Image (spheres, rainbow, N blue to C red):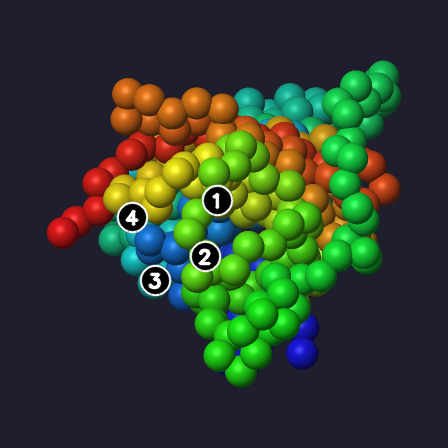
Amino acid sequence: MPGWLWGGDMGALQADTALRKVGDRLTATLSRDWEIWGPNGGYLSAIALRAAGASVPEDHRPASLTVQYLSVASFADVECVVEPVKQGRSAWLLNVALEQEGRRFLQAQVWTTNRTQGPRVLEAPFPDTPPPTSLKTYAEHVRDHYGDEAPRPSKFWANFDVKPLKWQPFDQPPERRPAALTEWYSFLQYDPTDLFVDAGRAVVLLDTLIWPTHHRGLEARPDYIAPSLDFAVWFHEAAPDEPWLMVDAQADISGQGLIFGRGRVWTPDGRLVASGSSNLLVSPLKR
């Protein structure tokens, strides 16, 4: 059985971000397969990105995405409101809002382009890590350690195969480490239908992983959560045929009620797919 799949369903990104067009209206249905503190922010942002992609010329691809999270959504139908702001010869800018029953819970700005000519330089260093083929998945580590008593993951994490560079059993006390994360991820049941769907993989990973990256730098388990206020990602190179993506992330600073982090997404052959960053708001757990 692949990855975390020890029974039960899992999400498929291309299906769970699919849009329906009726006249001028774009709608989608939120799937519980992407639940973390409500619908995952990266999952919602991937829907907004697809809504922009459905509204631009066919030869365009995503260049950047900036998102503001306004409130928590429900697992129900959403309306995607797209407003072209600039329609240039080689670049478009669009405002995208996601709404439920007239309430806006996400707003975003998306640049797209059909430009392909220009300099080609990569100065960012590729992390010195083993390839995914040489590493065990989380599921294999868990099975080896716990046997038949292996804990099940939350529903969201069942959507991936994950290969960590180092694995720590869940029942061990937290180990103080740098607030950095380097892991390989593969979306299960993924089918690269177009470049906007494919860019959604980087969106989900970069949005989601700043919190666990911050978590690694703590000496004790936190008594708070930290939902994202905003999130930005810049797309560099598409890799629709590459199943494994590496996230190299750092939670650079926390203070004054905020946590800031950034990350990069790479392919095994050293292509830089996307870069992103986000600001998280520290929120005490309800007692």
Label 3: state its secondary structure.
loop
Q: Earlier in the sequence, mark 2 or mark 4?
A: 4
Find residue 75 and name its label: 3
- Residue type for callout 1: Glu
Label 1: state its secondary structure.
loop
For this view, does 82 lie left or right of residue 140?
Answer: left
Within-10-Å neighbours for mark 1: few <14, some 14–19, many 20+: few
- Residue type for callout 2: Gln
Is 82 drawn above or below residue 170 in the view shown? above
Mark 1 or mark 4, whichever is nearer to me:
1
Find residue 128 and name its label: none
For this view, does 204 lie left or right of residue 211?
Answer: right
Rendered image quadrant of residue 112: top right
Q: Nearer the viewer, residue 245 or 221?
A: 221
For this view, does 82 lie left or right of residue 60?
Answer: left
Question: How much space separates mark 1 and mark 4, taking CA atoms?
Answer: 32 Å
Name the residue that disc number 2 marks. Answer: 172
Mark 2 or mark 4, whichever is nearer to me:
2
Give me the residue at 33% from left, 39% from top.
Answer: 226
The picture places residue 202, in percent across and down from the top left corner, at 62, 43
Question: How much space separates mark 3 and mark 1, taking CA atoms?
Answer: 35 Å
Q: Earlier in the sequence, mark 3 or mark 1?
A: 3
Name the residue that disc number 4 marks. Answer: 72
> Do we see residue 57 in this rendering?
no
